[in-house]
Image: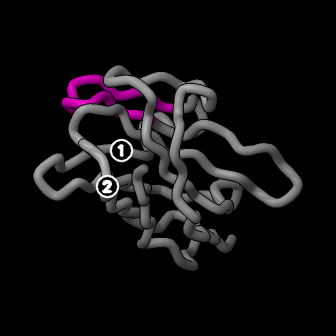
Amino acid sequence: QVQLVESGGGLVQAGGSLRLSCAASGRTFSSYAMGWFRQAPGKEREFVAAISWSGGSTYYADSVKGRFTISRDNAKNTVYLQMNRLKPEDTAVYYCAVGLWAFATKNTADFGSWGQGTQVTVSS
């Protein structure tokens, strides 16, 4: 069983930046891919970004490509999401998740453990 704790969310003006962190414990963190997803009110949870076990491969949703960067520090069992040039439509609860495999995918079904989420609100 793995425990995930997200942090770093908050309120920011459009054009601003936030850095989310997700600390993992209870499992061999470095062996698995990690991902970030988000869910806005009234919408389904959607993929944001994913990173392979080594950090060598990353994937992004088209809506965040060029603005968000996912990274990981296996020594600290932590994955990050740097979010720049934020837009009001980025407002959502952001969740990190542990992959079922070492390689990264965009599919929700390929992630087995989820954090509680952290709220990101972008004002216009």
Residue carrying label 2:
26
Q: Residue at x 67, y 60 (%)?
A: 92
Residue 17, disc = none
Q: Is residue 94 left or right of residue 105?
A: right
Image quarter (top left, top right, bottom left or bottom right) of the C terminus: bottom right
CA gap, disc 1 and disc 2: 25 Å
Q: Where residue 43 sits in the image (x, y, percent)?
A: 83, 48
Total numbered labels: 2
Please tell me whether residue 34 is drawn above or below residue 96 in the rendered image. above
Question: In the rendered image, which residue does mark 1 sit on?
Answer: 69
Closest to the observer, 43 or 122: 43
Label 1 CA crowd tier, 10 Å (few <14, some 14–19, many 20+): many
To which quarter of the image does residue 62 belong? Answer: top right
Magenta range: 50-60
Secondary structure beneath dot 2 equals: loop
x 21%, y 39%: residue = 30
The residue lying toward the viewer, choosing from 14 and 60, is: 60
Q: Position of residue 41 (x, y in %)?
A: 82, 60
